[in-house]
Amino acid sequence: MSRDLDIKVCIIEDDETIREGYAFLIGNTKGYKIVGTYPSYEEAAKKIAHDDPDVLLLDVELPGISGIDALPKLKKLLPDMHILILTVYEQDMLIFRALGNGAAGYLTKNTAPEKIISAIHEVMEGGGPMSAHIARMVISSFQRSASTPLTRRETEILEQIATGKSRKRIAQELFIDLETVKSHIKNIYQKLDVHSKADAIKTAKDNKFI
């Protein structure tokens, strides 16, 4: 892979040791390139549009504007950038606020280095990686309604989408082919009268279908 085709990554993390550790890990992995590191949102805001990263690793606890509050501002600056939250916190409300504000994934700082690398790759493929504990927390927050229009398989697929899995990964984990997954998703969209993944998840959650 030429350097032009590398996945470009930025980091916003106030702890210098952690920030440099991530930068070293990612920058020395083939296929990845660090294009900017910042200690705060305010510092990043000046240059990040020029860096134009594909993926941003964003800490929650930052001096000044917090990572959660910075999320919508960053998405406005760079709508196509994928944002992965990296934090020591695993509180429900923080997780749901982060995902609601546009985070593509949510990892804890004790995540193994190789998992962070694979999470960056996964988010580029359309997935939304989460630490296993966080994914369980998200699923357990869904209290299902009995009056759902979705079949059991469609519900299963929508739950997988809600925890950030890509269509390809869902197909692998459910032992079905990709076209079947796409067909189920099309049916889900029709039944819920929506046109996007975010709207399908929101409508299903609001009506307690998942």
Image: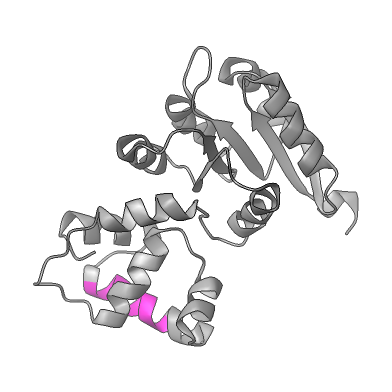
Q: Is residue 185 magenta?
A: yes
**Which quarter of the figure is the N terminus placed in?**
bottom right
In the picture as drawn, the residue positioned furthest to the top comes out as 64
Residue 183: name its quadrant.
bottom left
Between 47 and 148, the one nearer to me in the picture: 148
Residue placed most toward the observer, 190 or 17: 17
Residue 157 horizontal/vertical position (percent): 37, 73
Residue sitting at 52 percent across and 38 percent down?
A: 85
Q: Residue at x 15, y 59 (%)?
A: 207
Q: Residue at x 53, y 60 (%)?
A: 127
Tell whether 155 sits left or right of 18: left
In which quadrant will I find the C terminus? bottom left
| Numbered range of the magenta stretch | 183-191
The image quadrant of residue 206 is: bottom left
**In the rendering, at what x and y percent does residue 96 appear?**
34, 42
Residue that appears at 70% across and 20% down? 16
Task: Find the residue positioned furthest to the right.
Answer: 2
Location of residue 20 with respect to 176 vertically, above or below: above
Q: State whether residue 77 appears in this view.
A: no
Residue 82 among those drawn in magenta:
no
Q: Can residue 27 be seen at all in this image of the molecule?
A: yes
